[in-house]
Structures are given as C-alpha cells and as structure tokens.
Amino acid sequence: MSEFNITLIPGDGIGPEIVNGAVTVLDAVSKKYNHKFNYTEVYMGGCAIDKYGVPLPDETVEICKKSDSVLLGAVGGPKWDSVPSEKRPEKGLLGIRKALGLYSNLRPSILKPQLKDASPLKDEKLENGLDVMVVRELTGGIYFGERKKADDGSWASDEEKYSVEEIQRIGKIAFETAMLRNKRVVSVDKANVLESSRLWRKTMTELSQQYPEVELTHMYVDNAAMQLAINPAQFDVIVTSNIFGDILSDLSSAIAGSIGMLPSASLGATKCGMYEPIHGSAPDIAGQDIANPIATIVSAAMMLEMSFGLSEEAKAINNAVDKVLDMNYRTADIMSDGMTKVGCKKMAELIAENI
Ligand code: IPM
Ligand code: MG
C-alpha cells in the first residue's frame, strides 16, 4: 500500500462539482489498488477573496507545498470582475504556479473516436486523428513581465521577457516528451517580429543538438493556429511560450471535441505537481450538476502517473472513461443523437464503477 497527500483546490463556479467527481474516481482507485489518498481542501480564487480578502492565502501555498500533489478545479467568475487587478482570482492561479515553481505545463489533446461528432472540424480534416501535446512555458513571459500603466490611463504595457535558461528548461521537457512519443517537436514563436522569440528559436535550435533523434521544426504562431485548424494530425509535440500556449491549447482542445474533456499537468523541479482541467469555472452552469467532470478526472489520472508513478492506476481511469463513453453516456457538452445524457455526479459515478 502507498499513501499520498493530495491538496484539493475546488475553487469557483463548477470547480467544486468537478473536483468532487475526481475524488469519487480516486476513491474507487484507492479501494481497488489498496492505496491511501489523504485529501486536504484549501481556498484559492474568488472563494478565497470572499473568505480571506486575497485570492491566494499563505496557508494555501504552505499546504500545497507540503503535499504530494495538488488537484485544482477552476477559479474566477463575473462576481469578482470588478476587484482590483492585483486581487483578481486569476492572480491566485498565477501565484500558486509561481510559488510551486511549476514552469512546465503539459496539455494533451487527443481526439477520441467516440467524440468525432463533437469536433467542429469536418471529417476529412480529422481523417488522421489528433494527438498533440502542447508544452507550454508557465512561469515566465508576458504573464509575469513588468506591467505599467499611465496615471492618467492613457497607456498601458506588459513586458514579454525570456532568459536562455527559462527557454532551455522548457525545451528539455518538450524534447524528452517527444522521445516518448513520435519524436517530432514544433517550436512555436513569432520570431519574425519579436526579439524574445528570436532568442527562443535560437535556444531551441541549439538545444536540439542534444536530441539528434527528435526532429525540430519552427512555426510562427499565426501559421501554427492555421495549421492546427487545417491539418491537426501533423503535430506531435508543440513547445511554446506562456501566452501562445494558452491560446493554442484552447484551440487544440476545441478540435478534440470539447474543452470539458482535456486535462493538464503543471510540473517543476520536484514531483509535486498541480493537475487541472484546462477549462475555466463556467459560472453560467455552476451548481446545476451539468458540468463535464472528465477533464478533472483524467487530470487526476495524470497526477497518479506523473507524480505518484502509478501508471497502471492511471490507465484504469482512462480505460474507465473510454468504457463509459462506449456505453454512450454523455454530459451536455458532448451530447449527440442517440446518446444518454447524464449529469456531472452520475458521470463520475459511472467512471468510478468501471475502475
Ligand atoms: C489557463 C487559463 C489561465 C491562463 C487563466 C485563468 C489565468 O486560461 O490555465 O489556460 O491564462 O493561464
Ligand atoms: Mg487558458
């Protein structure tokens, strides 16, 4: 038996429902495989603003740091749109990524055959499928650069800055990820315009010398967006900056059918990672038991595999998800003709039953 301490950050909107769903599935895993998962729930985002006046209380950071990994739902919502920028719920998310040193964000998009109809692309564009891993730099770039604004409100600026070291360490993750996959890396930048992108491209090119088996190509971000839409199968691993990765991962997830399906892992120098669905808090459907818990459930599977080394257990979760989809159960976001519609809680229970 192994024992793991998991910090849960349910957050806002649909966050609590989908995290509950993931816990239902984790409990089924611990029962079947005889592990012990200890959960500690903490506040972050809008709910932390309401309770403590700040989006990321110190206590939350401390508890996350001490745990074996963190499972996050989502943060934010219109309720906190008017709070000052330094206190927005999203600040909490950026703060915890930085505090835990989670510089690498892995966002896989896989088109499941069961969900082909849910993809907005025509069948002919999906003939060769979609299986891409977006490796997004997560603690640098414009998200963390210097912000300025004029006192009179007449201008504002955000700085995009990358050091060689920051580019190298995310590059390494991308090349190593590619070695375990199809050995192709596309590095996405805007080197025809941005100085930081020229450094990015040069550094990736130099680094690629250490990975002779991996084919590295470069693509401008505008072209990459177009290529994803017209020929998504050409990609294996995409490595890119914080902001480009934010944008391209939403695009690749939409192509895979629904943003409600896709997980992510944020990792740093230690085994303690943070795992979260790539979608947001969806306040418009919160509390109605209609959200799709699958992205959070498969994020928990990534946690088992990448932070706890429990590959078999992770596979059991992914297989259970496939089985439930094969049984034609769907949440509202992936519903199509002839399928059985279920709510968030029921979907999680079905997956747990199939572990
Ligand atoms: C994401 C989200 C966040 C980001 C927001 C909520 C700050 O869009 O995780 O992709 O931009 O990183
Ligand atoms: Mg995003």
Image: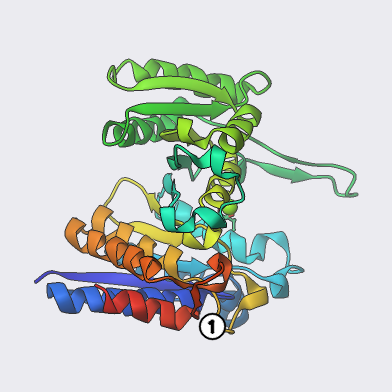
Residue ranking furthest to the front: 338
Residue identified by numbered label 1: 289
Q: Position of residue 16 (x, y in %)?
A: 49, 78
Number of labelled discs? 1
Asked if residue 41 can be seen in this view, the reply is no
Name the side, left or right, on which 242 lies relative to 24.
right
Name the side, left or right, on which 320 lies relative to 243.
left
Observer-nearest of 157 and 299: 299
Q: Position of residue 354 (x, y in %)?
A: 27, 74
Colour scheme of the picture: rainbow
Residue at the spot 49% in from the left edge and 45% down from the top edge: 139
Observer-nearest of 151 and 42: 42
Name the side, left or right, on which 335 lies relative to 26.
right
Quarter of the picture containing the C terminus is: bottom left
Quarter of the picture containing the N terminus is: bottom left
The residue under label 1 is which amino acid type?
Asp
Kindly indicate the quadrant of the structure image that contains residue 71: bottom left
Q: Position of residue 227 (x, y in %)?
A: 58, 31
Kindly indicate the quadrant of the structure image that contains residue 206: top left
Q: Position of residue 291 (x, y in %)?
A: 54, 74
Asked if residue 66 can be seen in this view, the reply is yes
Q: Give the secondary structure at mark 1.
A: loop
Name the side, left or right, on which 187 lies relative to 63.
right
Residue at the spot 48% in from the left edge and 41% down from the top edge: 136
10 Å neighbourhood of mark 1: few (<14), some, or many (≥20)?
some
Picture quarter with ligand 1: bottom right
